[in-house]
Amino acid sequence: MGSRMAKELAHPAPRGVFDKPGKAAWERLVGSLPDGWSFDPRELEILTEACKVRDLIGELETAIGDHGAMVSGSKGQKVVNPAYAELRQQRALYAQLLGKLELVDAPATGSGTGSDGKPQSAASKQASKAARSRWGSQSPRAAGQSRMNV
């Protein structure tokens, strides 16, 4: 029973009623967690909101597909479908919510892990990228020594 309970905590059922896009997002994100990882209550709330936003994105995409890129304005003129602006905003919100989850790559892939083999947070990966950009493959000390020897 203990392993079943641990699995339920690691891979919880959706916390709400989602349409197909939101449910698919939930399953993809929860299913992508590395073994032994789980979402805390704050992250579950963020994930729930992200899946609601993903459903809205699906609705907006359908509306644009049904009505097209151009619609009639108030005076009968052709204007860009206003659903595009809302779609852009919802996609930005979705990305922001997913960023707050600070998801990491699974350790099995080898990417997203630190030198100790443990998964890195999004902030750690960004800092590592900045350091590689600044110093390349050299350590800061080696870079300083090579300048002094020239």
Image (tube, helix red, strand yellow):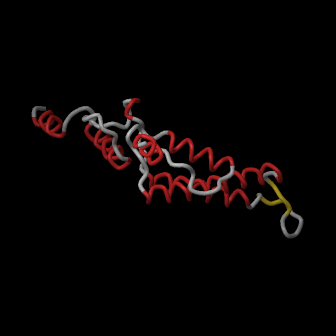
Name the spot of residue 126 as percent of width and height, x first: 36, 46
Question: Would residue 125 appear left or right of 39 to someone viewing this image?
Answer: left
Q: Residue furthest top?
A: 109
Identity of the residue drawn at 62% across and 52% down: 54
Question: Would residue 121 appear left or right of 47 to someone viewing this image?
Answer: left
Q: Residue furthest bottom?
A: 74
Q: Quadrant of residue 34?
A: top left
Name the spot of residue 87 as percent of width and height, x first: 67, 56
Q: Quadrant of residue 140?
A: top left
Name the spot of residue 74 as percent of width and height, x first: 85, 69
Work out whether 116 lies above or below 50.
above
Q: Which residue occupies the foreground of this view, 90 or 29? A: 29
Name the spot of residue 7 as percent of width and height, x first: 45, 42
In which quadrant is the C terminus drawn? Answer: top left
Work out whether 136 lies above or below 5.
above
Q: Quadrant of residue 100?
A: bottom left
Identity of the residue drawn at 77% across and 58% down: 81
Identity of the residue drawn at 25% across and 32% down: 137
Q: Residue furthest right?
A: 76
